[in-house]
């Protein structure tokens, strides 16, 4: 079935690139976002996020009339929901954080008002198992005049499916097009309709399954990586106590043909790996034991790094007979959750920098080449360039292995390298 108009709900790191790629195939695309600033920016042919190749693609699509942004949903043939799926505020009694599905529910109820028979609704937001079914219920509550898969199966008026994004920030455009997609419909006909929509631009395989399995697939992919990183992070702590170079250790262990240990770091960040395993644990709290333990290990790693910073402060104070740390400058190299991007979401580097600003009385220099201004949570820190940080700091804390940091190394001062590039 030909789909002439695509509506993307949520124009963030996934929604906007997806809208741009659809529009590049000469499809009419209506992007929807609750932020007037985002809407105005896109309609001016600009972008509010950093992603290679995205701004040029958006500019072309807007100028050719294939992409426009609005505040409220309009009629379309396919609705793709790519809104945040964070956690509710965690209390002291919450061993496992509870998912916040309010953004998905709001989006579902909003598009329900403009749905017509034959439309396709696809959820892309990473979600706990069963969320696609919940979304179908929310939509059906708004539109009793239409039929849905949960009650009418293959004969439903509206097709509903789940398809998780599987892209790497910094390479999103290419991966949207080239990567395989797992597409899970609530019925066989829902899967087929969703596949037809993605085939507009996807060159990879579109692998068909059901919505629950598709939801669990995305969560499993990131839980697997989280568990692997937890092993590396735990090894780094053990090796530090035993005076062993963890990076040398891992490189030697990886010489085994069936061993592939990941690299340690200051924690785990981003909107996927640091979040998705908790969605599994929230649904199966008594069974997801390894997954929970990996999350705990990785969540604790930033505080281990902070202990190393405190030890370095104490060392400098002792050597220089200082009564306080006011004259000690600390440089944090990198704030993003991964190399060579501007995304600070769930970043352990940002968390570490924020905590240092709280307890340290001296200067905290923040070197992040991919941003122009600091977020409010880092108020009190000083955004500066690489050369200035290298020249001024007494403690050099490498948190993100940006390309800019790989060819330099501090010539003096205490060095804490959480990524192993200044060893």
Image (tube, grey):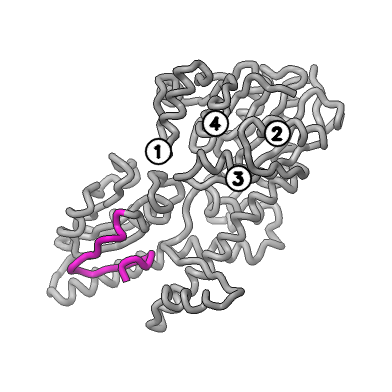
Q: Is residue 71 visible?
A: no
Comparing 374 with 193, the one in front is: 193
Q: CA distance from mark 3 to mark 1?
A: 21 Å
Q: Residues within 10 Å of mark 4 (few under 14, many from 20)?
A: many
For image coordinates 76% across by 29% down, the residue present is 159
What mark, if any, has residue 50 been given in the picture? 1
Mark toward the viewer: 3 or 2: 3
Residue 315: horizontal and vertical position, in percent?
22, 74
Which residue is tagged 2?
135
Q: Which of the two labelled residues, at mark 1 and mark 2, occupies the earlier sequence position?
A: 1
Residue 223: horizontal and vertical position, in percent?
61, 58
Residue 84 as seen in the image, left or right of residue 186: left
**Disc 2 on helix, strand or loop?**
helix
Residue 332 as seen in the image, left or right of residue 156: left
Q: Is residue 269 magenta?
A: no
* Quarter containing the C terminus: bottom left
- Residue bounds of the magenta highlight: 404-423
- Whether tag 1 and tag 2 are in contact, CB under 8 A, the answer is no
For image coordinates 17% across by 66% down, the residue present is 324
Q: CA distance from mark 4 to mark 2?
A: 25 Å
Q: CA distance from mark 3 to mark 2?
A: 26 Å
Comparing 49 with 404, the one in front is: 404
């Amino acid at each position: 079935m030909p789909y002439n108009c695509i509506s993307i709900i949520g124009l963030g790191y996934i929604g906007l690139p997806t809208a741009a790629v659809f529009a590049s195939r000469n499809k009419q695309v209506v992007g929807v976002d609750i932020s007037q600033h985002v809407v105005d920016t896109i309609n001016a042919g600009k972008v509010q996020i950093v992603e290679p190749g995205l701004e040029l693609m958006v500019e072309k699509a807007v100028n050719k009339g294939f992409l426009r942004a609005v505040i409220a949903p309009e009629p379309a043939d396919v609705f793709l929901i790519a809104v945040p799926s964070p956690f509710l505020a965690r209390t002291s009694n919450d061993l496992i954080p509870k998912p916040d599905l309010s953004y998905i529910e709001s989006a579902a109820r909003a598009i329900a008002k403009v749905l017509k028979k034959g439309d396709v609704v696809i959820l892309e937001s990473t979600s706990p198992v069963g969320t696609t079914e919940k979304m179908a219920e929310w939509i059906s509550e708004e539109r009793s005049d239409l039929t849905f898969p949960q009650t009418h199966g293959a004969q439903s008026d509206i097709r509903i499916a789940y398809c998780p994004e599987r892209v790497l920030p910094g390479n999103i455009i290419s991966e949207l097009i080239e990567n395989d997609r797992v597409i899970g419909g609530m019925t066989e006909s829902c899967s087929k309709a969703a596949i037809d929509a993605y085939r507009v631009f996807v060159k990879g395989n579109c692998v068909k399954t059901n919505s629950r399995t598709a939801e669990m697939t995305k969560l499993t992919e990131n839980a697997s990586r989280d568990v692997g990183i937890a092993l590396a992070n735990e090894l780094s702590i053990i090796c530090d106590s035993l005076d062993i170079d963890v990076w040398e250790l891992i490189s030697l262990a990886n010489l085994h043909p069936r061993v592939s240990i990941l690299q340690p770091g200051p924690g785990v960040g981003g909107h996927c790996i640091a979040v998705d395993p908790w969605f599994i644990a929230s649904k199966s709290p008594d069974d997801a034991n390894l997954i929970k333990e990996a999350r705990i290990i990785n969540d604790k790693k930033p505080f281990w790094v902070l202990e190393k910073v405190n030890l370095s402060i104490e060392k400098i104070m002792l050597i220089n007979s200082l009564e306080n740390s006011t004259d000690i400058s600390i440089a944090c190299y990198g704030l993003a959750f991964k190399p060579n991007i501007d995304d600070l979401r769930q970043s352990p580097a940002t968390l570490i920098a924020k905590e240092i600003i709280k307890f340290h009385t001296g200067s905290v220099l923040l070197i992040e080449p991919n941003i122009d201004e600091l977020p409010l949570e880092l108020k009190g820190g000083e955004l500066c360039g690489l050369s200035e940080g290298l020249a001024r700091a007494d403690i050099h804390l490498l948190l993100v292995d940006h390309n800019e940091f790989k060819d330099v190394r501090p010539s003096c001062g205490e060095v804490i390298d959480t990524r192993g590039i200044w060893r």
